[in-house]
Image: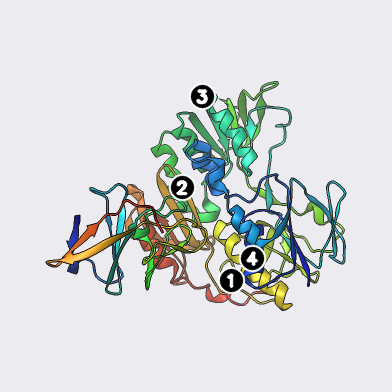
Amino acid sequence: MITVCRVEDLPPGEAVRVTEDVPAPVAVFNADGELYAVDDTCTHQDASLADGWLEGCLIECPLHASAFDLRTGLPTCLPAKAALRTHRVTVEDGEIRLHVSVGEPA
Amino acid sequence: MRSVAVVGASLAGLSTVRALRAEGFDGSLTVIGAERHEPYDRPPLSKGFLKGDVDADALALGSPEEYQDLDVRWLLGRTAVRLDPRATALTLDDGRQVQTDAVVIATGATPRTIAGTDGLRGIHTLRTLDDAHALRADLVSGRPHLVVIGAGFIGAEVASTARALGLEVTIVEATAVPLERALGREMGRICSGLHADHGVRLLCGIGVRGFTGTDRVEGVLLDDGRLLPADVVVVGVGVTPATGWLAGSGVEVADGVVCDSGCATNVPRVVAVGDVANCPNQFTGRRSRIEHWTHATEQPKTAVRTLLSGTSAAPPPVPPYFWSDQYHARIQLAGHVSPGDEPRVVEGDVDSRSFVAVYRRDGHEVAVLAVNQPKMFNRLRRTLLPFPSAVRIPS
């Protein structure tokens, strides 16, 4: 379990990239008050989704506009075809905690 | 309309097929592709694939399952050599005829070459997967000197990749400032500064007179008499739209296939998409061939609507967008830069190679350029609108 940041440091519409103590970088999003965590690197080509465009619970890759559903990790449009791994996020004592999963994506 | 033939098995061709099926077209679909490969992604050919980090399988744009669903007849390794004037039949290079009710022209463009390169091994252009295979074989053969002719984006990416492979790289550029046409003078100079940062020699304002070597290239002779040693040469001096096969078809051709804003040509039930399509563009303010990857995925939706509805309608005004990855720098541009447009850095600074610049014309924001600033770039690109005087354009 990784402490990401204080809840107030991740306002709605923002993302934070976690690179320490994870097998691969993870992006944690505040999508209109709901927190989600997915692998940060787009499954199509090397780009950081934390830099992407967040709309509802869809994140659009900043390079080629692949979009993923943060709830499932599944791509909702091409060019990406593979899903992102999703990770569990909890809030404890006002801090965002990331529980990194190592299983296969959906 | 019971059958559609798509000429060109590229990203634009595949995107057309996808759009036709997504819009409910259930007739027969034939795709004719000059290369023997199924559609693949070209951008990595000058980067990850050329470097050896990405294999050919990873470039595939579709999957066997998807192709089964799309139900397409693929005629690969074949070119169309003739379109009859009623656009009801294509003739292929093996003499075969393909009967069709509608034609989508997606034949793209071919790289320009330089006279005097015939018969000399070691001189390459880069467009196709086969080109990239051949170039990679030469780059990793242990010959140390690469000369790239043309400092455009392809040339710059090849130079960057070759440098990462440990070659000595010299770029020769005919104009005084590389990338000036795409980025303007000031930003062209800044972005081409990446070469010097990484030990690549850039010679500007100089033409190429010829090559030395008998069987294999040994040097590049410059206009000023200098001779650059060269074991491998890459020519990246632009492309020519592939329209020769349309002679006699009645389809109007002028720097590509002349289309209206809905991708319709002057011949009924013939549309064009991708690099070959020369359509009015609200951001450039004139007819333009937009040779960008994203455009090749978006424009086919417009062409398919035109084909299926029989009425040509312009797409929503989305600014042209392209990116280029060089030397760990990600360059992104949205909109269109015309001579005189003034860039202003709004975030970061150019010396650190991490910045965003917004171009203005008469106070209007017309383009956004970013180097290693994707987040801010993507916010700003959504705010771009066509320049007011460019909204009304002749169709």
Q: Tell me the subunit letter for badge 3.
A: B
State whether residue A64 appears in this view.
Answer: yes
| Label 2 sits on residue | B325
What quarter of the picture does the C terminus of chain B occupy?
bottom right
> Label 3 to label 4, Cα distance in Å?
43 Å
> Label 1 to label 2, Cα distance in Å?
27 Å
Q: Residue at x 27, y 61 (%)?
A: A88
> Label 1 to label 4, Cα distance in Å?
17 Å
Residue type, label 1: Gln
Label 4 Cα crowd, 10 Å radius (few <14 / some 14-19 / many 20+): many
Instruction: Please identify, in this view, whether the residue under mark 3 or under mark 1 is nearer the observer.
Output: 3
Q: Nearer the viewer, residue B112 or B78?
A: B78
Helix, strand or loop status at disc 1: loop
Please check whether the numbered discs 3 and 2 fall on a single chain: yes
Q: Residue at x 39, y 64 (%)?
A: A72
Describe residue B91's horizontal placement relative to residue B125 as left or right. Answer: right
Label 1 Cα crowd, 10 Å radius (few <14 / some 14-19 / many 20+): many
Helix, strand or loop status at disc 3: loop
| Label 4 sits on residue | B300
| Label 3 sits on residue | B144
Task: Report x, y in % for residue B164.
Answer: 44, 34
